[in-house]
C-alpha cells in the first residue's frame, strides 16, 4: 500500500446522531448505548500531509479515529453548519494551530472573511487562505491531485463543491450534499448519472444519502437532497465494471441506521453500500 489514503471520519448529516432535541427511536437507541455518528468528514493522508475535508464540532473524536495530531490542509465543501462549525477549534482556545492551508471557493472565502472570529484566525496566521476554482485540478503533491466539482445545493451563503482526490492508484469522489439529480446532472452536462461518474474517471464515490425516501421529514422540501431510493433507481444494481458507491451524510431519520431494517437489506441487494466511520481507502 502506498502513502496516500482516505479515511471516513463521519457519515452523519450536519446534526449528527443522536440529533439535538430529537427523541426518535434511532436517537434514543444511540443515546442509550452511548453511541454516536459524527457529521460527514473525510481525512486524506498523503505522505507528511493530512487533508481534512470539512470540519465538524466532533473534530476530537474524528481525528482520534486515525490518530492524527496535525492537520496541514482543510478543504471546505460549503458553508452549512456541520461542515464548518469545528473551524474555531484550531484557534488559541483549543488547538492553537499555525499555518493550516484553508482551501475554499471564492464565496466560501467571503463568508469566512465576513465572520469576525474566522477572519481573526486568518489574520493571526492560523489559517492561510487558498482559494480554488471549480474544475481546476490542484497538484497538491507528487502523489495527490484534488479537483473541486461544483454542484447545486441551496446556496444561501456559499456555493457547494464535491472533491475528487486522485492518488497514484485510485480516485475518490466525495459528494456529501447536493439538491437533486436533475440539477446536478444539468450542471455537469450529462443526462445520465453513470455517464457523469464514468466521465470523472473515479473508482470510489462517497455520495449524499441524507434521506432514504422523499417523505421522511415534514419539512423535507426545504432541505432538498436526492433520496437514496431515487439514486438507486437511477443507478440500478451495481455491475462488476462499476465504481464502488458508499452513501454518506445520513440523517437521523434514515432507516439505514437500523442494521435490521428492510431498507439496509434493499441497499445491500443493490450492491451499493452504506459508508461507516473508520473505513479506509488506499488511493
Ligand atoms: Zn450537510
Ligand atoms: Zn432522531
Ligand atoms: Zn448543506
Image (cartoon, rainbow, N blue to C red):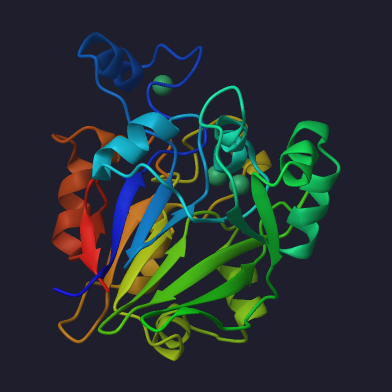
> Which residue extends farthest right?
114
Classify the position of the C terminus by image quarter: bottom left
Frontmost residue, 66 versus 195:
66
Along the horizontal axis of the image, is 80 left or right of 48? right
**Residue 128: where, in percent of width, then height?**
67, 56
In the figure, residue 161 lies in which quadrant?
bottom right
Above or below, 40 relative to 1? above
**Residue 157: where, in percent of width, then height?**
79, 47
**Residue 43: where, in percent of width, then height?**
37, 54
In what quadrant does ligand 1 lie? top right
Classify the position of the N terminus by image quarter: bottom left
For the point 74% across and 54% down, the residue is 108
Along the horizontal axis of the image, is 264 left or right of 94? left
Above or below, 120 relative to 4? above
For the point 35% across and 40% down, the residue is 63
Along the horizontal axis of the image, is 42 left or right of 271? right
In the figure, residue 203 lies in which quadrant?
bottom left
Amino acid at each position: 500500500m502506498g502513502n496516500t489514503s482516505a479515511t471516513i471520519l463521519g457519515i452523519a448529516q450536519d446534526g449528527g446522531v443522536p440529533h439535538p432535541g430529537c427523541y426518535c427511536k434511532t436517537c434514543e437507541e444511540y443515546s442509550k448505548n452511548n453511541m454516536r455518528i459524527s457529521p460527514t468528514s473525510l481525512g486524506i493522508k498523503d505522505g507528511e500531509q493530512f487533508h481534512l475535508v470539512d470540519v465538524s464540532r466532533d473534530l476530537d473524536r474524528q481525528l482520534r479515529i486515525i490518530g492524527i495530531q496535525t492537520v496541514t490542509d482543510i478543504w471546505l465543501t460549503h458553508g452549512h453548519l456541520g461542515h464548518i462549525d469545528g473551524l474555531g477549534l484550531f484557534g488559541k482556545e483549543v488547538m492553537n494551530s499555525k499555518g493550516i492551508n484553508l482551501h475554499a471557493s471564492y464565496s466560501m472565502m467571503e463568508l469566512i472573511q465576513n465572520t469576525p472570529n474566522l477572519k481573526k484566525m486568518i489574520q493571526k496566521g492560523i489559517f492561510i487562505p487558498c482559494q480554488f476554482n471549480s474544475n481546476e485540478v490542484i497538484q497538491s503533491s507528487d502523489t495527490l491531485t484534488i479537483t473541486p466539482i461544483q454542484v447545486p445545493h441551496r446556496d444561501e451563503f456559499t456555493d457547494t463543491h464535491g472533491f475528487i482526490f486522485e492518488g497514484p492508484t485510485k480516485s475518490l469522489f466525495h459528494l456529501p450534499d447536493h439538491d437533486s439529480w436533475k440539477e446536478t446532472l444539468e450542471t455537469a452536462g450529462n443526462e445520465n448519472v453513470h455517464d457523469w461518474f464514468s466521465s470523472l474517471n473515479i473508482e470510489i464515490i462517497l455520495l449524499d444519502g441524507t434521506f432514504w425516501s422523499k417523505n421522511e421529514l415534514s419539512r423535507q422540501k426545504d432541505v432538498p437532497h436526492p433520496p437514496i431510493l431515487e439514486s438507486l433507481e437511477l443507478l440500478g444494481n451495481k455491475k462488476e465494471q462499476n465504481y464502488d458507491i458508499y452513501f454518506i451524510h445520513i440523517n437521523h431519520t434514515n432507516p439505514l441506521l437500523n442494521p435490521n431494517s428492510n431498507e439496509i437489506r434493499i441497499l445491500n441487494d443493490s450492491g451499493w453500500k452504506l459508508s461507516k466511520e473508520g473505513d479506509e481507502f488506499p488511493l
